[in-house]
Amino acid sequence: SSELTQDPAVSVALGQTVRITCQGDSLRNYYASWYQQKPGQAPLLVMYDENIRPSGIPDRFSGSSSGNTASLFIAGAQAEDEADYYCNSRDSGENHVLFGGGTKLTVL
Amino acid sequence: QVHLNQWGARLLQPSETLSLKCAVYGGSFDFYYWTWIRQTPGKGLEWLGEINQSGTINYNPSLSSRVSISVDTSNNHFLLRLISVTAADTAVYYCARGVHRRHPPSRFYQYMDVWDKGTTVTVSS
């Protein structure tokens, strides 16, 4: 199946750690990338490859992968982390790009 | 610092053709996949397709009969055309730079690291 599945919504208490997951068969061949999107803004890349943060992304963001599941962790979540998060991968068989449906993160 | 800027018609009538152009400033046009993505109101991201400098093109299968992407390497532009638009094509359209690499020994990774700010295209009669 060439789909990526995310939980629609996740919440975390301020300062706590949250895990956002993404599942799909393509993740057995491709490491996920992760994007943060705030209202009215373009998506921002926050994680790629196995666990690489682009310049400027705080080190409280980390990533991991196991089997068909990729995870984005935010340690010590801040109010400014409240956003939609999308995972992204590629279907190598069909050579097209996949996005998960997005997870809305609420910081309580 | 690479940045992207797109332009094109923002209000279309049903059955017309959507045409958007994205210019790449401040970086190489080579070694990347130049990508179009859209987001319908209140919904998630939808990949439309990509092209690299050698003309390799991949399209979203659900749109492949209506979409075409081309590249103008002499001007560092890439273009999106979507024919026979309907209200369902109303969305924010983004252009982005895509990277697709091998992660030895046996896996890969891909991501879009540079995005433009997006253009809202409305289809309405």
Image (cartoon, coloured by chain):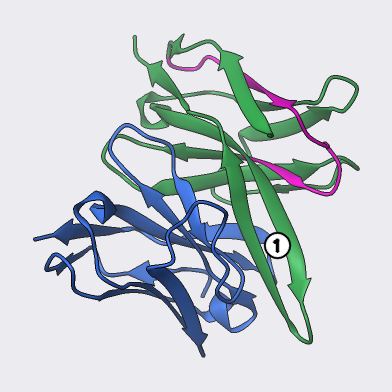
Chain colours: A blue, B green
Q: Quadrant of the C terminus of chain B?
A: top left
The residue lying toward the viewer, choosing from B117 and B19, is B117
Task: Give the residue displayed 86% in from the left and 40% down from the top.
Answer: B53
Can residue B69 be spotted in the picture?
yes
User: Which amino acid type corresponds to the residue marked 1 in the rendered image?
Assistant: Asn
The boundaries of the magenta stretch are: B14-35
The N terminus of chain B lies in quadrant: top right
Residue at position x 43%, y 47% in the image: B45
**Residue carrying label 1:** A95
Q: In the structure shown, which secondary structural element does the residue marked by tag 1 occupy? A: loop
Residue B70 is situated, as x and y percent measured from the top left of the image, at: 78, 30
Q: Is residue A54 magenta?
A: no
Q: Give above or below for A7 relative to A58.
A: below
The answer to whether residue A34 is above or below residue A36 is below
Direction from residue B97 to residue B101 in the image, left or right? right
Identified at 73% across, 25% down, the residue is B25
Residue B23 on the magenta span: yes
| Residue B121 image offset from top left, x and y in percent | 43, 20
Residue A90 found in image quarter? bottom right
